[in-house]
Image (cartoon, grey):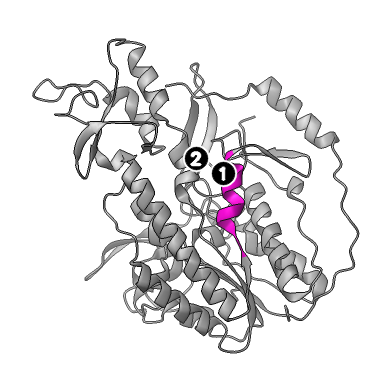
């Protein structure tokens, strides 16, 4: 299966061109406006933690958008900001993906970097087997927890089920009884950012509509209202973010139906369609059905392979491409519907509390087509677009810098501040092998 990528020579020319381009940055005297940034906290999930390349590791943590925002807030009285970093000996964190090169057919060769902070696993009654990560002790301002849903934020025992949260908590796994929002708001703070809610639909989408269900819309609205009430209870001001439409990310837009069909037709020209399994039964796939990124690796060995009855995989209704590998058009519509509903709730609650809103959905959707920012071209193209990391869902440091900039613009608009935005050209995109 062949993806289109720019050659290394063209990449080098692009890098040189970007280096020679000096963006004009306006000189603005930083002012805090009517907000107090002396202690900023960030609540959220993997995006807040700096998760990238299918893992949480030190380089990603250092390039999280809260770290970037906090650095800019220092110009208007912001205080120290602490992220629960893995130490140098644990730098690989939970492990992550790394681009190793390209195959002769143009496919990226992506390998796994082993974890550096795993310390075994433990079985928790009622939960199951949970991996353990090296504990962090110290101050925390960045409370980003990969995997957390909005509806988990008030669950007292949640720290026993999520190793990314558990490593922040004092005490032993299996004994935790502190809800996420209780933990994040335990110490005084003056300003917050909140990017919760993505995982309430992401699990359903990334699993091809199998194995998880989106959080009920009314339940989400009630949980978001409660979360923001908690975050603003002490009078703190803040900024919230909407939920991106995950179906527009490279995770769903790289392995296309046309690409899969062309691959099959190269050796079997008589094939005219692929067959997918849906909730309504098997049917011919269309361009409106979205195949998940991991299927690109599996497809060459699966497509056309006969089952015990001799029916070729993906080419016959009796042996269709499994539901877990494709978000069919009806499931795509459902994801968009829930995302829109969640975002309406977010905007409504934010308006009721006079909070700033960073519209991440509008921001990231526009990068389906190439955009130029400070002389750098960015898009949601897998690997070459430099916006999304190697997992196809989370951002690169350059992508996180883009969101940090939009967060700050929203803050400035709402609170009359003039906080400078970070220069995205100072941050990397996808790391190419040397």
The residue where tag 1 is placed is 388
Marker disc for residue 45: none
- The span picked out in magenta is 358-368
| Quadrant of residue 29 within the rendered picture | bottom right
Can see residue 334?
A: yes
Q: Which of 22 and 89 is in front in this view?
A: 22
For label 2, the SS is: helix
* Above or below 410: residue 63: above
Quadrant including the N terminus: top left
At 63% from the left and 53% from the top, the residue drawn is 400
Q: Which of 357 and 230 is in front in this view?
A: 357
At 40% from the left and 77% from the top, the residue drawn is 222
Say if mark 2 contacts mark 1, CB within 8 Å.
yes
Disc 1: CA contacts within 10 A as few (<14), some (14-19) or many (>=20): many
The residue where tag 2 is placed is 250
Can see residue 138?
A: no
Q: Nearer the viewer, mark 2 or mark 1?
A: 2
In the displayed structure image, the side of residue 199 where residue 128 appears, left or right: left
Q: Residue furthest left?
A: 309
Q: Position of residue 343 (x, y in %)?
A: 49, 64
Tell me the distance, in whole angstroms, between the alpha carbons under discs 2 and 1. 7 Å
Disc 2: CA contacts within 10 A as few (<14), some (14-19) or many (>=20): many
Q: Position of residue 267 (x, y in %)?
A: 32, 10
Looking at the magenta stretch, what is its main secondary structure? helix
Q: Position of residue 188 (x, y in %)?
A: 61, 86
For label 1, the SS is: loop
* Above or below 1: residue 215: below
Q: Where is residue 375 in the image (x, y as percent from the top left)?
A: 78, 40
């Amino acid at each position: 299966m062949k993806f289109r990528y720019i050659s290394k020579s063209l990449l080098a020319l692009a890098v040189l061109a970007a280096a020679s381009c000096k963006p004009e940055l306006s000189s603005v005297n930083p002012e805090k406006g009517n907000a107090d940034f002396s202690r900023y906290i960030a609540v959220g999930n993997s995006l807040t933690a700096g998760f990238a390349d299918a893992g949480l590791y030190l380089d990603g943590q250092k390039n999280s958008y809260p770290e970037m925002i906090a650095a800019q807030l220092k110009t208007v009285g912001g205080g120290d900001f602490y992220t629960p970093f893995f130490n140098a000996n644990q730098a690989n964190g939970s492990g992550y993906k790394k681009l190793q090169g390209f195959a002769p057919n143009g496919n990226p060769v992506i390998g796994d970097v082993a974890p550096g902070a795993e310390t075994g696993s433990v079985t928790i009654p009622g939960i199951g087997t949970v991996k353990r990560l090296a504990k962090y002790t110290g101050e925390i301002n960045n409370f980003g927890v990969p995997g957390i849903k909005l509806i988990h934020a008030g669950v007292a025992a949640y720290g026993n089920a999520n190793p990314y949260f558990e490593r922040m908590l004092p005490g032993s796994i299996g004994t935790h009884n502190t809800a996420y929002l209780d933990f994040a708001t335990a110490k005084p703070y003056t300003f917050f950012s909140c990017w919760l809610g993505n995982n309430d639909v992401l699990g359903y989408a990334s699993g091809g509509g199998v194995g998880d269900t989106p959080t009920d819309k009314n339940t989400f609205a009630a949980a978001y209202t409660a979360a923001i009430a908690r975050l603003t209870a002490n009078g703190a001001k803040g900024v919230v973010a909407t939920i991106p439409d995950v179906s527009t990310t490279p995770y769903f837009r790289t392995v296309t139906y046309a690409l899969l069909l062309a691959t099959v037709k190269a050796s079997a020209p008589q094939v005219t369609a692929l067959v997918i399994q849906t909730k309504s039964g098997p049917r011919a796939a269309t361009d409106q059905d979205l195949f998940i990124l991991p299927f690109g690796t599996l497809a060459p060995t699966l497509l056309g392979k006969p089952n015990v009855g001799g029916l070729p995989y993906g080419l016959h209704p009796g042996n269709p491409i499994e539901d877990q590998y494709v978000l069919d058009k009806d499931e795509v519509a459902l994801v968009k519907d829930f995302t829109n509903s969640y975002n309406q709730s977010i905007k409504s609650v934010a308006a009721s509390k006079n909070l700033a809103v960073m519209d991440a959905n509008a921001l990231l959707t526009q990068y389906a087509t190439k955009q130029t920012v400070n002389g750098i071209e960015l898009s949601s193209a897998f690997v070459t677009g430099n916006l999304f990391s190697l997992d196809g869902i989370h951002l690169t440091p350059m992508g996180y810098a883009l969101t940090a900039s939009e967060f700050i613009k929203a803050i400035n608009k709402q609170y009359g501040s003039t906080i400078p935005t970070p220069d995205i050209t100072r941050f990397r995109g996808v790391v190419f092998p040397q």
